[in-house]
Image: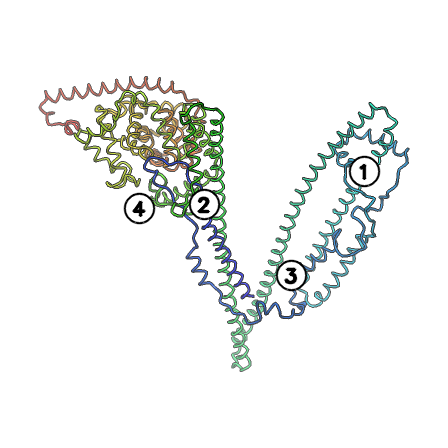
Amino acid sequence: MAYWLQELQQKRWEYCNGLDAAQRDSRTSPTPSDFSKGLVAKDNADLNVVRPNASAEKARNVLAVETSPTELVGEQAACHPVPGQPSAINFALKQWGNEIRNSVTSLRTGKGNSENRRSIFYTEEWEMLDPTPKDLEESVAQEERRRPSSEPSQGVSGSSFPFDFGHIPHKTRRPLKEIIATSRNRNSLDAAPVECSSNKLVPEMQLKFQSQQEELERLKKELSSQKELVRLLQQTVRSSQYDKYFAGHLCEVGPKDKLELLHQKDHQILGLNHQLERLALEKDRLQQETRSLQCRVGELSEQMGMLMETIQAKDEVIVKLSRELAECQETATGQCGSTPSPTPASTNKELLELDRLKDSLQGYKTQNKFLNKEILELSALRRNAENRERDLVAKCTSLEAKLCQVESKYLILLQEMKTPVCSEEQRPCHDVVAQLLEDALRVDTSDQPEQTLLKPHLVSEYDIYGFRTVPEDDEEEKLVARVRALDLKSLSLTENQEISLGVKWENYLASTVNREMVRCVELKNLIRTGVPHAHRSKVWKWCIGLHVKKFKDSAEPGYFQALLQNALKKQNPASKQIELDLLRTLPNNKHYASPTSEGIQKLRNVLLAYSWRNPDIGYCQGLNRLVAVALLYLEQEDAFWCLVTIVEVFMARDYYTKTLLGSQVDQRVFKDLMNEKLPRLHAHLEQYRVDYSLITFNWFLVVFVDSVVSDVLFKIWDSFLYEGPKVIFRFALALFKFKEEEILKLQDSMSIFKYLRYFTRTILDAKKLISIAFGDLNPFPLRQIRNRRAFHLEKVRLELMELEAIREDFLRGRETDPDKRDLISDDEEDG
């Protein structure tokens, strides 16, 4: 048996590994439709296929049970004569279960080889009699009275029932009680030797008797259902006879009445046909459910039989060991009372017992090794099967999205083809046709890396934006980052299965092939849900061009290049600080990690060019992070105009100047909004005197860069570049509302401030955050923010004027007072 099990294990392992190899060879995925133009465009995730687990294979070889057959196996065993029947003592519980099932099967209706059976429609009360015309008239009157109240049941037993009872042969059938009695006698005779042989089979016989009683109850229910069916069929026959009777009397009725009756019968026939079709579908569904339940019951019965066998074997071992323990205790007691010299017979007996125990120990070791190997193999096969299933689901989802894209493009092409163009110039759809032809002729080759929506590896070193997922130094932070990366991966896998948003984007972009994108409610809602990675470069560039159109129109051609040339030729005061901050911009992103990284030079060019465009600002710490995020999806010139959009269009004046006047005003506006939208949380923070503007100031200054995870960050930037600075207030409030209950539980100012410093990195569900920002916080009018800005701007200006007056008084006092001449302010020292 061990040899057979080992061979089956080997065949199963080879078969499943063959499935994995075939899966790796045949795996394909559609290529992306277009590519981004920023730094992340070159980072295409390669396909990570499932490889055989080397550690599992090694452990499997170590745990292999080396067994050689001691008897005939394979073809020799198949050709060998069948061994005799087992004795009653070795009769297993599984065999008893098979015997019970066989005996119960003989009791089922319509099964067995007995010829003394009647039709399943047979009943003792039913006789095919031709009713008299008088009986027919009375029955018709009763049926007409009952028809309005029992219309559904009459529809079941209408005249369209396709049974012909005249051709059903009537055979004799043994009564059910006689069959059950015969089966009981036969089972009792079969079980008699076993009962005589051993008293241990009493529970099995009770189980057998109980199962037969359950089968008897089931047969009784089946008999009652058959009788109900016969009753319905009798009504069907009567209905057909009534129809025959009506057809005979139609000749005596006028043509108009005949037509009404025919119409009535036609409607009745149609209704009955629909009812019959519905019931047939219901019957098929119930039959399928019955078959599945029967299979499940069979599996559970086999499992129960195996468990009963195991329990019985363990009980026997326990009894045997208990008996041996009692004998050992008696022997030890006898030896303590009197220590007789051991006889040769007792010594031989003990040696034999020792050998037997050693053999049993070796057998248990072999069995344990085999079971460990079985567990390992099943676990590995289950993991491989799950990976194959996930890969197939992801591939199917990607193919459906690609199909929708192609269908949308072809629909646009057909719509363009409808309108004839009487000109020799190339039509607008010429480029679309060329692109479709190129896509159709493209063939996947082995040189091209395969793309897939799903990676079997859980966490990679960098995400799709180039940010490091797990830090290198701090072990505690590394663990937290790995947990966060795993949560992000699970969320991304869930979102990849939902292709409806991707299909909406593809349909919208396909509709703008021959026209420019315009502001509309549909585009606004799509951008709020997040722009897909493949289309973010195009959407960002369009949003920036929308806001800086007036600046671009007034600028000369090559404006950015001219600024860059001036910055490279001449040094300005901001150049030194820009060089100091380049490597400190995004150190956890591989595009800005080293001086030789591609992003560093692009970042330097954009910052230097803008310092020449706006000498009043020059460079402010925070601009480098804004440009670095923009460069991930945009080229240098587009990133330059993105910085112009943020600094000169979106943000208020003096937002990035030396005084940071606009930033201070926005913090006070945000406090007012906190008091209005989240009064409980605002009161809680005020109670413990927590100045949360120390945390939120950086959110507004760099638009949440380095404050939230990358997936959430870029979804915020999608809405920010389209709608403007109001989005910052929305998401700042949404972050606090997301963790409102956790903050309210903290009852200490130090713990609250410590929690506020890192809680935004724990928010991973971008979908929920977007729902809070654009749903729960409504209404959110921009006019209210503008009014509050104007109100607080005057107050902050007055405070700054007071501070400036105090400073001038101090300077004048220092000039007149000799004791204060040695005092130097920080600004003077820097100057």
Q: State the residue position of label 2.
A: 28
Question: What kind of element bears circle 4?
Answer: loop
Displayed quadrant of residue 737: top left
Give the quadrant of the C terminus: top left
Quote the CA–CA distance across marks 1 and 4: 83 Å
Q: Foreground mark, 2 or 3? A: 2
> Which amino acid lies under the numbered mark 3 shown in the image of this protein?
Leu
Q: Nearer the viewer, residue 83 or 499?
A: 499
User: Pointer 3: residues within 10 angstroms few (<14), some, or many (20+)?
Assistant: many
Question: What numbered label is drawn on residue 235?
Answer: 1
Q: Secondary structure at mark 2?
A: loop
Q: CA distance from mark 2 to mark 1?
A: 61 Å
| Alpha carbon separation for disc pair 4 and 3 | 60 Å
Query: Element type at marker 1?
Result: helix
| N-term mark: 2 or 4 | 2
**Count of numbered circles on the image:** 4
Using the image, tell me which numbered label, if any, was put on residue 93: 3
Callout 4 amino acid? Glu
Query: On the image, numbered disc 4 is attached to which residue?
Result: 472
In the rendered view, tell whether residue 597 sits above or below residue 679.
below
Q: Mark 4 or mark 1, which is nearer the start of the sequence?
A: 1
Give whichever of discs 2 and 3 has the lower sequence position.
Answer: 2
Q: Quick check: can you spot residue 339? A: yes
User: In x, y percent, where is residue 556?
Assistant: 25, 23
CB within 8 Å, label 2 to label 1: no
Between marks 4 and 3 in the image, the one whose residue lies nearer the viewer: 4
Q: Are marks 1 and 4 in contact (CB under 8 Å)?
A: no
| Residue 235 locus on image (x, y percent) | 81, 38
Residue contact between numbered discs 2 and 3, judged by CB atoms under 8 Å = no
Alpha-carbon span between mark 3 and mark 1? 49 Å
